[in-house]
Image (spheres, rainbow, N blue to C red):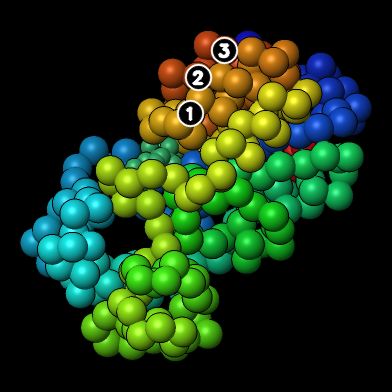
């Protein structure tokens, strides 16, 4: 079923009122109305200092030019610093208190769910506001470390820090997917918000929820490969649709 933003069905309202366990998977689209560019929305590859961002975000850049990776992520944090959560982030943050069990899984690294008040967020792709030591694995809040030029060092062991995000070609943080998959298996209502559903394993979470019998709802202005397995596709911007629930 495909519905316009204003048309939240009575079926969904009733499922929302009675759901015991809810899982929400978000992607770049949930932050679009905050001004964060999506990955696949623009139709062209973003260049930064002459280098395409998908090259800058390759895992091999950590070995070949860690300073350039930091410069790129410092730039991204500088942009994010000026942006605020939107009504979609806020609605999701409020949902936590409504359900017996609630799990928010995001592919975003921008930290805007936390800024809106969400807690216990499963961040499948890491967070740009954290650094991780290449030597001892310690993690740091980069805001507490302060901004620096060049490659920051680990206060514990002196090793080089890297941004604590998943770069192209890297594994997800240990246990993050497994934890999310267990929640997906047990939810009775699943929202898929603002993701093109092209990147795995994140995109397999709604498939797990669907196979396990959850009521599936997609929120996106465009159809995705997951639309056909959803009971409802709410076609429009997340910042307008989610607050209606
Ligand atoms: P994409 O850029 O692939 O998809 C963004 C989705 O958001 C599209 O389906 C849009 O139609 C939708 N969208 C745009 N504006 C929206 C709005 N206002 N409300 C709701 N939806 C909206 O982003 P992701 O699916 O998040 O991985 O991309 C997944 C992963 O691909 C990213 O986490 C990143 C990238 O490779 C890593 O960096 C490891």
Q: Position of residue 68 (x, y in %)?
A: 18, 70
Q: Residues within 10 Å of mark 2 (few under 14, many from 20)?
A: many
For disc 2, does the CB lie below 8 Å from ligand 1? no
- Give me the residue at 89% from left, 40% from top: 100
Taking the image as four quarters, which one is ligand 1 found in?
top left
Residue 134 as seen in the image, left or right of residue 50: right
Q: Is residue 199 visible?
A: yes
> Dividing the image into 4 quarters, which one contains the C terminus?
top right
Q: Is residue 129 visible?
A: no
For disc 1, does the CB lie below 8 Å from ligand 1? yes
Q: Residues within 10 Å of mark 3 (few under 14, many from 20)?
A: some
The residue under label 1 is: 203
Along the polypeptide, which appears first: circle 1 or circle 3?
1
Residue 226 disc label? 2
Q: Position of residue 35 (x, y in %)?
A: 44, 58
- Give me the residue at 87% from left, 31% from top: 20
Along the polypeptide, which appears first: circle 2 or circle 1?
1
**Label 2 to label 3, Cα distance in Å?**
6 Å
């Amino acid at each position: 079923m495909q519905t316009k933003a204003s048309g939240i069905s009575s079926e969904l309202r009733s499922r929302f009122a009675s759901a015991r366990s809810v899982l929400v998977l978000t992607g770049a689209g949930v932050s679009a109305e905050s001004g964060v560019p999506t990955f696949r929305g623009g139709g062209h590859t973003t260049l930064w200092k002459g280098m395409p961002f998908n090259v800058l975000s390759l895992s091999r850049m950590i070995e070949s030019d860690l300073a350039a990776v930091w410069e790129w992520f410092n730039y991204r944090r500088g942009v994010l610093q000026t942006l605020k959560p939107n009504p979609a982030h806020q609605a999701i943050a409020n949902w936590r208190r409504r359900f017996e069990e609630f799990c928010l899984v995001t592919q975003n690294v921008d930290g805007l769910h936390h800024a809106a008040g969400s807690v216990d967020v499963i961040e499948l792709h890491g967070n740009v506001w954290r650094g991780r030591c290449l030597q001892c694995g310690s993690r740091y809040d980069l805001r507490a470390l302060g901004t620096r030029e060049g490659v920051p060092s680990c206060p514990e062991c002196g090793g080089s820090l890297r941004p604590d995000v998943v770069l192209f070609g890297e594994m997800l943080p240990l246990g993050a997917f497994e934890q999310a998959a267990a929640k997906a298996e047990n939810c009775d209502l699943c929202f898929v918000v603002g993701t093109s559903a092209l990147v795995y394993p994140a995109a397999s979470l709604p498939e797990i929820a669907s196979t396990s019998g959850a009521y599936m709802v997609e929120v996106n202005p465009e159809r995705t490969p997951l639309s056909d397995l959803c009971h409802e596709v709410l076609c429009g911007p997340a910042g307008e649709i989610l607050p209606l629930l």
